[in-house]
């Protein structure tokens, strides 16, 4: 009898918890895209609802907010972005809606050029520390031990990625990218971006000018570049044409831009970094 009563009590309690969970399902913390959103999930408690505006596979640079995004942002307690130059649409929204005090930039300073800073482990650790402080100030519960674990995971990724590129001789460490952004990553791991097909990340669909294209071809030849990268999910036509004209193998598609859908390789920051570093190293290593 007692156990039956207990079971009823448990059922009642779990229903209540579910209702509480349902009431809280509005995201408290809204991030611009999948990468900061994963960090929010890792350092807050399970009951903190969080979401990303741009879903997996979405393009960060040219994003335009829709009406649903606006409503989601309006209800958020804290909004997280990387940098106002990278996510100008988020800065504009916060200004127009007087929510700047609730917008936490993980890298608020002017961006160094070539700056997808979430690909640089030392910067990621600074961003995570800043995120914890911002969440704490907003009264959102964080876990000291989860933050500690995450920082350790970043160190482990840094070591693995370093090991991945270690066998490459100095002349096999350069590549051309589809859009600017990997220069800081390259610098952190002893690699070199020899050029970028698009000159600006905010215009990922625009084609390069004839002059820029000719200069790229020239630097590929003089610097003996053998690898061209294309952006996964973006039109690779220009990268394919460049590879053809330069007499190189087809471009290698990478994505350091977002996390893959849950359950697929690259669905966490750590696996995204390891996966893309592996792809890049394999391309650079090919004879
Ligand atoms: Zn980018």
Image: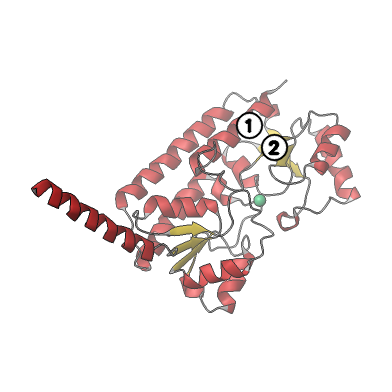
Q: Quadrant of residue 16?
A: bottom left
Residues packed near mark 1 inside 10 Å, few (<14), some (14 to 19) or many (20 plus): some
Give the number of the disc on residue 13: none
Nearer-N-terminus badge (2/1): 2
Front residue (pair 144, 126)? 144
Residue at 81% across, 35% down: 220
Secondary element under disc 2, as helix, strand or loop, is strand
From what the image shows, is residue 96 above or below residue 43? below
The percent coordinates of residue 211 (x first, y second) are 90, 49
The percent coordinates of residue 77 (x first, y second) are 43, 69
Front residue (pair 194, 49)? 49
Q: Quadrant of residue 20?
A: bottom left
The percent coordinates of residue 232 (x first, y second) are 68, 42
Give the labeled residue for mark 2.
253
Of all residues, the one furthest to the front in this rendering is 1
Of all residues, the one furthest to the top in this rendering is 287
The percent coordinates of residue 94 (x first, y second) are 55, 73
Give the labeled residue for mark 1.
279
Front residue (pair 57, 24)? 24
Q: CA distance from mark 2 to mark 1?
A: 8 Å
- Quarter of the image with the C terminus is top right
């Amino acid at each position: 009898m007692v156990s039956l009563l207990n079971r009823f009590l448990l059922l009642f309690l779990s229903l209540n918890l579910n209702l509480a969970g349902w009431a809280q399902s509005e995201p408290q913390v809204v991030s611009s895209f999948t990468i900061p959103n994963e960090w929010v999930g890792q350092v807050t408690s399970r009951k903190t609802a969080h979401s990303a505006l741009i879903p997996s596979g979405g393009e960060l640079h040219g994003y335009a907010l829709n009406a649903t995004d606006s409503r989601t942002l309006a209800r958020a307690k804290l909004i997280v972005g990387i940098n106002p130059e990278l996510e100008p649409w988020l800065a504009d929204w916060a200004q127009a809606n007087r929510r700047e005090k609730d917008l936490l930039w993980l890298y608020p300073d002017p961006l160094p050029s070539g700056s997808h800073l979430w690909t640089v482990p030392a910067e990621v650790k600074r961003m995570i520390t800043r995120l914890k402080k911002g969440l704490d100030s907003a009264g959102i519960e964080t876990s000291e031990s989860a933050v500690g674990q995450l920082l350790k995971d970043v160190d482990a990724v840094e070591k693995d990625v370093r090991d991945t590129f270690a066998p490459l001789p100095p002349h096999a460490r350069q590549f051309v990218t589809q859009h600017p952004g990997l220069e800081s990553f390259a610098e952190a791991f002893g690699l070199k971006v020899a050029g970028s097909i698009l000159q600006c990340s905010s215009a990922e669909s625009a084609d390069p000018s004839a002059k820029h294209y000719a200069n790229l071809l020239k630097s590929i030849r003089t610097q003996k570049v053998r690898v061209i990268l294309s952006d996964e999910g973006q039109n690779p036509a220009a990268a394919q044409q460049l590879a053809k004209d330069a007499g190189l193998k087809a471009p290698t598609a990478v994505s350091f831009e977002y996390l893959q859908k849950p359950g697929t390789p690259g669905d966490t920051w750590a696996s995204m970094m390891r996966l893309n570093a592996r792809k890049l190293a394999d391309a650079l290593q090919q004879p």
